[in-house]
Image (tube, rainbow, N blue to C red):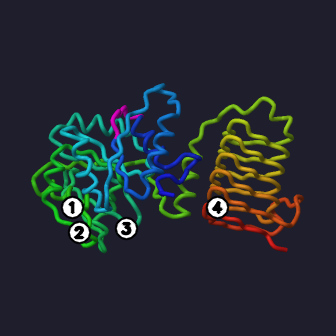
């Protein structure tokens, strides 16, 4: 699946992005898509729009899908959206980013400073060689951008949230494709600076998480789960002979039997758990069927099945429709044979052979 649709805390990364945008009262969203993943992206966005919004009932923003026929760079994506954007200031928010940013405050500050052609969200990072890096002048304005420098002049990385005024279109028109054949947004912003436009920097004090690899995704899940607020559990939970502690969000129509769950844990709707031990920092997708197993620090996507698995599952990423079939019998507790870390693609099946 597109990495923008990989769930973090049972919610696609793209939905986290859209929630951040909606919280800033932005009512018009253009979503750049490519031909390969457009149907999946559009279906996910429609599902998001259909969800009730607690703070603004029935006021999900309008979304327009804008095709980018070939992956020719982020600046090219802005060009593709020019007709949609017109002469309005706009936010550019990369759809695979997880950032706990107060976008509303950032936007208000930008709109109150009409002399700024752009405002960039920056974050101090340990390994700036992997990112676009900004150099600031004494007044805190951006004076130079360098894409993935071998010898970084700073530790301030671009983190994927940009605010622009229409001057960016003129800047993009004056740049050339990079060595990898793309119109780079860093080159376009550098052109703004070269043309004597003011580019503001906002150094982000909160967290920013990359989700490109398994460990990054698990870290992102842990951070988001750590911010769960307590939620009431069903009144009849005592009848399940289960023990729950910590912050636990239990979805609709879930069945628990002889389970021990230590939060933070997020369990989606229509799950059945029988003799299962779940440790902290675990999210379980919709319609999971788990029996006689132990897991912790893991992400399970929708329709997972685990039957009598003899090892404790930890730090694992398990895709949709995965079956873990333990042939050692239903009385296995999930700790008999130590720990396992698993990364399983959608529709996988793994059998325990004895």
Q: Which residue is mark 2?
A: 178
Give the Cα distance between marks 2 and 4: 38 Å
Indicate whether 160 appears above or below 23. below
Q: Which residue is mark 3?
A: 130
Q: Is residue 6 left or right of residue 251?
A: left
Percent x, y of residue 261: 75, 47
Q: What are the residue bounds of the magenta stretch?
A: 23-29
Give the Cα distance between marks 1 and 4: 41 Å
Dot 1 or dot 3: first in sequence order is 3
- Closest to the camera, between mark 1 and mark 3, is 1
**Which label belongs to residue 347?**
4
Dot 1 or dot 2: first in sequence order is 2
How packed mark 2 is, by other alpha carbons closer than 10 Å (few <14, some 14-19, many 20 or more), is: few
> Regarding mark 3 in the picture, which secondary structure is present there?
helix
Give the Cα distance between marks 4 and 3: 33 Å
Q: Mark 1 and 2 residues: CB-CB less than 8 Å, in contact?
A: yes
Q: Is residue 139 left or right of residue 23?
A: left
> Regarding mark 4 in the picture, which secondary structure is present there?
loop
> Regarding mark 2 in the picture, which secondary structure is present there?
loop
- Closest to the camera, between mark 2 and mark 3, is 2
Percent x, y of residue 249: 66, 39
Q: Which residue is mark 1?
A: 187
How packed mark 4 is, by other alpha carbons closer than 10 Å (few <14, some 14-19, many 20 or more), is: few
Q: Quadrant of the C terminus?
A: bottom right
Report if residue 44 is visible in the image.
yes
- Closest to the camera, between mark 2 and mark 4, is 4
Query: Which residue: 48% across, 25% down?
Result: 57
Query: Which residue: 74% across, 67% down?
Result: 339
Which residue extends farthest left?
195
């Amino acid at each position: 699946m597109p990495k923008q649709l990989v769930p973090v805390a049972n919610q696609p990364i793209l939905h986290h992005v859209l929630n951040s945008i909606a919280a800033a009262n932005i009512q018009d969203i253009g979503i750049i898509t490519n031909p390969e993943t457009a149907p999946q992206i559009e279906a996910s966005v429609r599902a998001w729009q259909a969800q009730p919004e607690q703070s603004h009932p029935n006021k999900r923003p309008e979304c327009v899908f804008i095709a980018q026929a070939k992956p020719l760079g982020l600046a090219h994506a802005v060009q593709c959206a020019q007709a949609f954007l017109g002469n309005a200031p706009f936010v550019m928010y990369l759809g695979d980013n997880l950032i706990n940013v107060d976008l509303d405050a950032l936007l208000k500050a930008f709109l109150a400073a009409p002399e700024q052609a752009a405002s960039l969200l920056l974050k101090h990072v340990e390994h700036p060689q992997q990112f676009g890096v900004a150099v600031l002048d004494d007044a805190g304005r951006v004076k130079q951008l360098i894409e993935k420098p071998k010898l970084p002049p700073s530790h301030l990385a671009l983190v994927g949230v940009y605010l622009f005024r229409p001057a960016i279109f003129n800047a993009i028109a004056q740049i050339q494709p990079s060595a990898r054949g793309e119109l780079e947004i860093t080159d376009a912003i550098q052109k703004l600076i070269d043309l004597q436009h003011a580019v503001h920097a906002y150094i982000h004090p909160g967290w920013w998480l990359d989700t490109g690899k398994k460990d990054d995704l698990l870290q992102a899940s842990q951070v988001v789960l750590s911010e769960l607020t307590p939620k009431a559990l069903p009144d009849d939970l005592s009848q399940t002979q289960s023990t729950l502690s910590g912050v636990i969000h239990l979805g609709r129509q879930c069945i628990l039997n002889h389970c021990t769950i230590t939060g933070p844990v997020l369990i989606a709707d229509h799950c059945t758990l029988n003799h299962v031990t779940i440790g902290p920092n675990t999210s379980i997708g919709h319609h999971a069927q788990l029996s006689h197993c132990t897991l912790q620090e893991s992400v399970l996507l929708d329709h997972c099945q685990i039957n009598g698995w003899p090892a404790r599952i930890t730090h694992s990423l398990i895709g949709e429709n995965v079956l873990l079939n333990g042939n050692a019998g239903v009385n296995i507790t999930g700790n008999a044979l130590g720990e396992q870390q698993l990364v399983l693609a959608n529709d996988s099946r793994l059998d325990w052979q004895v």
